[in-house]
Image (cartoon, rainbow, N blue to C red):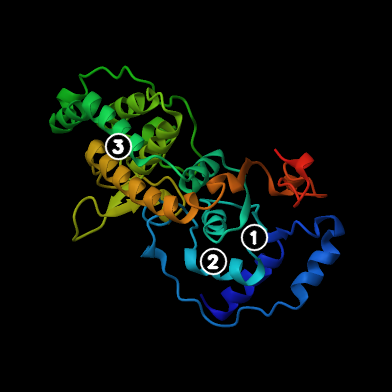
Amino acid sequence: MTALDSVTAQRLCHTALLRVWRGDCASEGMDAMSAMYADIPPITKYIVPQKQATKRNYGSHQYFTKRAWNVIQGYIERFTKPGDVVCDPFGGSGVTITEALVLGRKGIYLDISRWATFLAEQIALAPVDITNINTAFTKIERACAKKIHAWQKMSREDVESVPLTRWYPQGKPLPKNADAALVEDLFTYRQMLCLSELYHHVQKLKDQVSRELLRYAFSATLYKCNRTFISAQGRAESRGGSSIFSIFRYKVAKRVIELDPWDIFARSVRKLIAAKRETNLLIGERPGGSSNAQFFTGYAQRLTDHVPPDRGPFPKRGDANLAG
C-alpha cells in the first residue's frame, strides 16, 4: 500500500467503507459521529499485507477486489471499539465484515451482487459443524465422483454422446465484450456434463447449512472449470486463473484446459473446511458468532432501506424493544 493508497483508504473509512454507528450516540446524528473521529490520529505507518496468512480470505474462494485482512483489521482497530457496528456498503467478498466479527465488532454488509452477498455470508458463518460438512461431502462423493472421473477419461466424441440431463443455466446472455454469447458457452460439453451432475447432488443435500457451504465450494470450483481458465506456462496445468478475475472480461483461452471437476471440488472443500475451522475459533467462540452481522443485497445509495438511520439494525444497550 503506497502513501496515496493509505490516504485513500482512510478517506473511505471516514465515508463509505467503514461508517460506524455507536450504540450510545446513534441518535445524535452524523455531527456527533464526526466529532468522535476528530481526535483519532490517522494511520501513518505502512501495514505490510499478509494476504496468504489466513485460510478464510484468499485461500477459500477467488474474488475480484479482495484486500488483505490485516490491513482491514488495522483500520477497524484504529477507528472503532469492540461492540461497535462496522458497515461496508460495498461489501464484495466480505473481508471487512468478517474481520469486524473477528475483532468483536458487529457488522452490516451490503452489496449490489447476490453472488457476492452469498460468498460473504458463507465465509463469515460461524460456528458450523465440520462433521456435517464432511458427511455431506462423502454423500456427494459416493453419488457422483466415479461417474465424473469416468467422463473425464472419455474421448471427446464419446463424452458428447452422453445425454446432459441435469439442470444447467441456459439462455443467459453475457456482456457484449465477452468471447461467448451465453453463459453455457463458457463451458465445454464435458465440463457442463460433469458440473451439472455435481451441482445436482449438492442441491439434493437436506442440511441447509452444509448445502450452502458446499455450493460455496462448487462456486470456487467453477473458477478453474470453464473455458476462460488460462493455465500458467511452465507450471502444472491446474496452476493458473480465469480471465474473468484478471482482465475482468469473459475471454476464452486459446488452449482450453479441462481439469477434472471432482478433483477441483474436493480441493475446494478441503480449503473450505480449513477456513471454517479458523472462523469457528475466531468468530464462532464469541457470543452470538456470525449472527452479529447482517447481510443485505442492494444499492449503497439505498442503505437506509435496510438500516434505519435513527438506530441501525442492532438494538441499543438496554433497549429490548429493538431486538430482532
The residue tagged 3 is 134
Report, in whole angstroms, how far the alpha carbon at label 2 lies from the one at label 1. Answer: 13 Å
Name the residue beneath numbered marker 2. 73
Q: Quadrant of residue 74?
A: bottom right
Q: Secondary structure at mark 2?
A: helix
Mark 2 neighbour density, 10 Å: few (under 14) some (14–19) many (20 or more) = some
* 3 and 1 marks in contact (CB < 8 Å): no
Q: Choose the circle earlier in sequence order: 2 or 1.
A: 1
Q: Nearer the viewer, mark 3 or mark 1?
A: 3
Q: Is residue 118 left or right of residue 211?
A: right
* Percent coordinates x, y for residue 180 in the rendering: 41, 37
Q: Quadrant of residue 199?
A: top left
- Work out whether 150 lies above or below 281: above
Q: Amino acid at mark 3?
A: Asn
Dot 2 amino acid type: Gln
What residue do we see at 55% from left, 43% from top? 117
**Mark 1 falls on what kind of element?**
loop
Q: Which residue is mark 1?
A: 17
Alpha carbons under labels 3 and 2: distance apart? 31 Å
Which element is circle 3 on?
Answer: helix
Q: Residue at x 66, y 78 (%)?
A: 42
Q: Amino acid at mark 1?
A: Leu
Q: Earlier in the sequence, mark 3 or mark 1?
A: 1
Along the line of sight, which residue is nearer the eye, 270 or 186?
A: 270
In terms of depth relative to the viewer, which is nearer, 287 or 274?
287
